Amino acid sequence: MARPPKWRHVEFIPDITYFKPAGVPLRQLDEVVLTVEELEALRLKDLEGLEQEPCAERMNISRPTFIRIINSARTKVAEALVKGKAIRIEGGTYQFVRPLKCWDCGNEWSQPQDETSKECPNCHSTNWAPKRMQRGRCHGHNRQDIPD
């Protein structure tokens, strides 16, 4: 009997979940389905530029599992681009988590969105907040200081 899949931690849920080639009616398109955890793997590895091990840790999975997920995601995106297919993002085995940071000791941790943390698991301080996600780099400069 197969082991049930482990919930993958995801820190980003997209607002836009459908992409299609311009100028082609939807009824004429085939589509590929990219799961939410496949999108998260692409975001962590290709957008944030993390190595495989930190990506796997942030998603709460093993490195071999991360490699399988990222390879599947890249294959689907390549197929859509090369063959002119639409990409739909939906489904998967994931749990949305919030990245948190303690302002006293600098500890960073994640917790499921539906759980409420009262203190840092490292120093038990109540001086913590959601960690701001990095929004990209421009000419080697960090763009975190740009207001929302």
Image (spheres, helix red, strand yellow):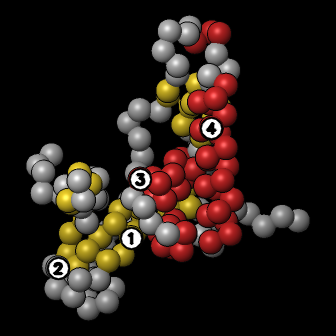
Chain-order first, disc 2 or disc 1: 2
Residue 115 falls in which quadrant of the image?
A: bottom left
At which x and y percent is residue 11? 41, 57
Residue depicted at x 55% and y 10%: 24
Q: What kind of residue is marked 3? A: Leu
Instruction: Give percent across and percent down for residue 113.
Output: 38, 59
Q: Amino acid at mark 1?
A: Ser
Label 4 neighbourhood size at 10 Å, few (<14), some (14-19), many (20+)? few
Of pointers 1 and 4, the one earlier in the residue sequence: 4
Q: Nearer the observer, disc 1 or disc 3?
A: 3
Dot 1 corresponds to which residue?
A: 110
Q: Is residue 107 left or right of residue 80?
A: left
Q: Position of residue 136 (x, y in %)?
A: 29, 53
The residue to which callout 4 is attached is 78
- Whole-percent x, y for residue 7 in the image: 59, 62
Amino acid type, label 2: Trp
Query: Label 2 belongs to which residue?
Result: 103
Image vertical order of residue 66 relative to residue 138, above or below: below
Residue pushed farthest right? 1
Q: Is residue 2 above or below residue 46?
A: below
Q: Earlier in the sequence, mark 2 or mark 3?
A: 3
Q: Which residue is mark 3?
A: 47
Which of pointers 2 and 3 indicates the residue nearer the eye? 3
